[in-house]
Image (cartoon, rainbow, N blue to C red):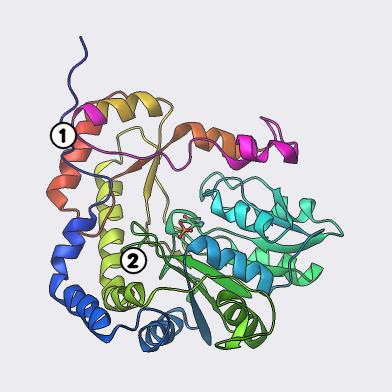
Amino acid sequence: MTKPRPSVVIPLVDLKAQYLSIKREIDEAISRVIMSSGFILGAEVSRFEEDFATFCRTRHAVGASSGTAALHLALLGCGVGPGDEVITTPFTFVATAESISMAGARPVFVDIEPESYNIDPTGIKRAITRRTKAIIPVHLCGRPAEMGAILGIAAEHGLKVIEDAAQAHGAEYKEQRVGGIGHVACFSFYPSKNLGAYGDAGAVVTSDDHIAATVRLLHDHGRREKYGHLVEGYSYRLDALQAAILRVKLRHLEAWNEARRKHAESYRELLGNSGLGLPVEARDSRSVYHVFVVRSKNRDGLRQQLSQRGIDTGVHYPLPLHLQPAYRRLGYRRGDFPVCEQAASEVLSLPMYPELTRAQIEEIVLAITESTV
Ligand SMILES: *Cc1c(COP(=O)(O)O)cnc(C)c1O
C-alpha cells in the first residue's frame, strides 16, 4: 500500500509569503495604475526601466513582455538572423535556445563546467565557425558564468555576448553586476524568479546605444510614433501593471538576495556531512541562489522520500536541450555533452526563497539525513 502524500509542508518557493510581506506597497501600486487607466507603456514603464538600468549599472533598460521576448529582441538587436549560429549551453531553460531559432539562427550547444553548471569556455572555442555570430552564456541558478574568458574569446572572433541573466538579478562577477558585463543582457521576471512580476514580464539591458535603439523600436511594432512604422516589429511590451509591481519589488531585491545567500550558507553548514554534492561559493563572484542545487546518485529516490515528508523539491533540468525532441533536427546524440548529461541525472533543487526560515531549513536537513542520499 502506498502512503498518501502529505499536503505540501515546505514548498519549493512561496510567493504568497512574499506578497504578504509587502502587501500595502503592492496594493497601492496596482490601484494607482488602474485608477490612471494607463495600462500600456507610459510613466510606470519608463520609471521602472530607469530604476532597473541603474540597478544593473547600464545606460539602458527596455521592458519586455517576457524573458523569452527579451532574448529574441537582444538577438535581433545584435543583428543575428538566418544563416547565423549562436553558441549556448544545453543545460538551461528551453527559452535560451528557442530565442535563437526565433531569430532565424541555429543554436550550437557546448558542454558545461561540472562545478558551476555554466557553459565551459574551452568548449566555446572549439564550437566557433565562420557562421558564429554570438554567444549566450546563462548565469544558471544565480551564479555568474566565466565572463572574463567568454568576453576574451568573443573579442578575438568579433562575436557579440548576450547574457541570459533570467536567474541572476543582482549577481556579481568580479565587482560587476550581471547584465552590464556582455554587450547586452536579458532578464525574466517570471513570478518565481529572484525579481518576479505577477504574470509574464522581462527586460533587455545594455550600454550600447545602437542595440538599445533597435530593441526599443522592435518591441513596440517598429514604431516611433503611433501609426508611423519604420520596420515590422513585435508586440513585446512590458505591462504598466507589472512595471509598477516590479518597481516596488526592486526596492527589496538586495535584502531578498542577501536572505537567499544566508539560507545557502545554512544549508552548506548543516549538509556538510550529508554525502550530498553541495554548490561551492566562487571566490570572485556573488551568486544570488535563484535555486539551491545539490547532487545525489540517488536523486529520484531522495526526491520521493522528501516528498513523502512534505518537502517539495525541483529538478533543473531533467533532460538537457540537445536530447529534447524539439531539437532532434540539430542532430545531437546522448554522449555529446557528458558533463551536462550526468548533472541532469543527479541535480536536485531544495526549497529556496527569501522568506524561508532557519527552522524550515533544519527540518529539510533532518529529512535528508534520515533518507538515502
Ligand atoms: C525563466 C528563464 C527564461 C525565460 O523567461 P520567461 O520570462 O519565462 O520567458 C530564459 N532563460 C532562463 C535561463 C530562464 O530561467
Residue 181 can be seen, yes or no: no
Q: Disc 2 to disc 1, how far (Cα)?
A: 26 Å
Above or below: residue 21 compared with residue 89: below
Q: Residue at x 61, y 76 (%)?
A: 218
Q: Residue at x 22, y 38 (%)?
A: 365
Percent x, y for residue 74? 62, 70
**As shown in the figure, which amino acid type bears the numbered disc 1?**
Ser
Task: Say which residue appears at 39% left-offset and 29% top-offset.
Answer: 299
259 with respect to 278 (left or right) = left
SS majority, magenta: loop
Residue 334 among magenta residues: yes
| 295 is higher (above) or lower (below) than 4 | below
Name the residue carrying label 1: 7
The disc placed on residue 197 is 2
Label 1 CA crowd tier, 10 Å (few <14, some 14–19, many 20+): few
Left/right placement of residue 351 relative to residue 227 reads left
Q: Splitting the image into 4 quarters, where does residue 191 fall?
A: bottom left
User: Percent x, y for residue 82?
Assistant: 79, 60
Quick one: 320 or 229, which is closer to the camera? 229
> In the rendered structure, does residue 108 fall within the stretch colored magenta?
no
Which residues are drawn in magenta?
A: 307-336
User: Residue at point 14% right, 67% down?
Assistant: 21
Toward which corner of the image does residue 254 lie, by quadrant?
Answer: bottom left
